[in-house]
Image (cartoon, rainbow, N blue to C red):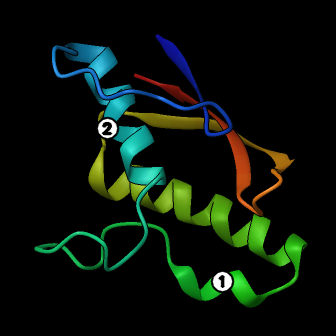
Amino acid sequence: MEYIIDTSKPANLNWAAKDAERIAQNVRNLISTWRYEVAYDRTLGIDQNMLDKPKDTIVALYVAEIYRLVSDYEPRATVKEVKFIGVDDEGNMQFRVVIEV
């Protein structure tokens, strides 16, 4: 089953999520977390060192980080596609991630 995760839209945590929906929610949480933000797993999350680089470089590094995070921390999901959508008014990069569970 495929799920589309759009980081440009806010998502609420569903505490009752089960099975594939729970896995998709886990992936969204992974790609929304910065490295060193999780107290007992400091290497979990997107590396912030890429933020001072040119936009094209950041996009490529962010896409690579998404693939790494999902394969390392949520092996039940497979990333099918990552597409850069744009940058919002606050400077946040937005991505569309397609995963298969």
- Give residue 64's position: percent from left, percent from top: 62, 64
Q: Quadrant of residue 92?
A: bottom right
- Give residue 66's position: percent from left, percent from top: 54, 56
Q: Name which residue lies at 79% across and 87% down.
A: 53
Does 42 sit left or right of 47 as displayed? left
- How many other residues sit within 10 Å of disc 1, few (<14), some (14-19) or many (≥20)? some
- Give residue 57's position: percent from left, percent from top: 82, 77
Give the vertical position of 50 relative to 28 (above or below).
below
Does 56 sit left or right of 47 as displayed? right
Q: Which of 1 and 35 is in front in this view?
A: 35
Q: In which quarter of the image is residue 8?
A: top right
Q: Residue furthest left?
A: 40
For disc 1, the marked residue is 50
Q: Nearer the viewer, residue 76 or 85?
A: 85
Asked which secondary structure carries label 1, the reply is helix
For disc 2, the marked residue is 26
Query: Looking at the picture, which amino acid does disc 1 mark?
Result: Met
N-terminal-most mark, 1 or 2 = 2
Asked which secondary structure carries label 2, the reply is helix
Q: Name which residue lies at 30% across and 33% down.
A: 76
Q: In which quarter of the image is residue 50?
A: bottom right
Give the vertical position of 16 relative to 9 (above or below).
above
Q: Name which residue lies at 30% across and 44% down.
A: 74
- Give residue 25's position: percent from left, percent from top: 35, 30
